[in-house]
Image (tube, grey):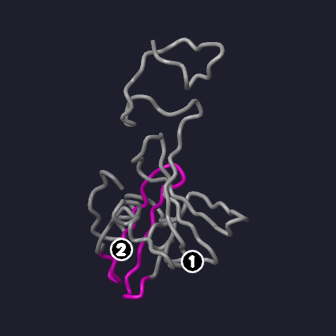
Amino acid sequence: MPGSRPLATEADAIAAHGRPVRYWQNEDGTRTLEYSNQPFGHVTLMVTVAASGAVLRQQNALAFENLTRVERGMTREQVSRLLGTHRSVEFFRLSGEEVWDWNIENDGPGIYTYFNVHFIDGRVVRTSRTYIFPHDGPEMGGRSGFPMFPSAPLHPLRPRHLTAAS
């Protein structure tokens, strides 16, 4: 996780982060410990350890470089192994899509960014992003890049989003 120290052993990982959300047994005899902080955080730490218990690597599964590894045709299990536990699932009856999402580091104009993986018949068909805005409209100022406007009184006949700043 951001700011976490390098880990030497599986015991170090458990001491630092607690019990993993899941253990993944890998084909090469190693295993991966998954530390997900979904649905609210934007990091999933994957710690791969050798049979001896030595840490071979640790990475944020929700880093941009890893998100780009999701490919058309992957199964649900392959996506879970790659990205870790998802935040939520939505079913869209008309399109036949099952959409999993992960809260990721905000890279957009909103206050949250979700990475979405769309499945049809259990296979990835595409990915997308969703930008979440506060209930009172787009964020002004701050990380969004929009200039900060001074408060303006609302005109009684015009919606708030059409009111010019004074």
Q: Residue at x 55, y 35 (%)?
A: 134
* Image quadrant in which the C terminus is located: top left
Q: Secondary structure at mark 1?
A: strand
At which x and y percent is residue 117?
53, 65
Residue under numbered circle 1: 123
Number of marks in picture? 2
Amino acid type assigned to the residue bearing label 2 in the image: Thr
Amino acid type assigned to the residue bearing label 1 in the image: Arg
Q: In the image, which disc is placed on residue 48?
A: 2
- Is 120 left, or right, of 62 in this rendering? right
Reply yes or no: does residue 17 show up in magenta. Answer: no
At which x and y percent is residue 147?
37, 27
Q: Residue at x 51, y 70 (%)?
A: 22
* Image quadrant in which the N terminus is located: bottom left
Comparing 122 with 149, the one in front is 149
| Sequence-wise first label, 2 or 1 | 2
Which residues, given as a range, are shown in magenta? 26-54
Please determine whether, in this image, residue 107 is positioned above or below residue 61: above
Whether residues under marks 2 and 1 lie with C-beta atoms below 8 angstroms apart, the answer is no
At which x and y percent is residue 32?
41, 74
Indicate the quadrant where residue 100 lies. bottom right
Comparing 12 with 61, the one in front is 61
- Is 49 left, or right, of 155 in this rendering? left
- Is 62 left, or right, of 152 in this rendering? left
At which x and y percent is residue 44?
43, 60
Please determine whether, in this image, residue 81 is positioned above or below residue 6: below
Q: Secondary structure at mark 2?
A: strand
Q: Residue at x 55, y 11 (%)?
A: 153
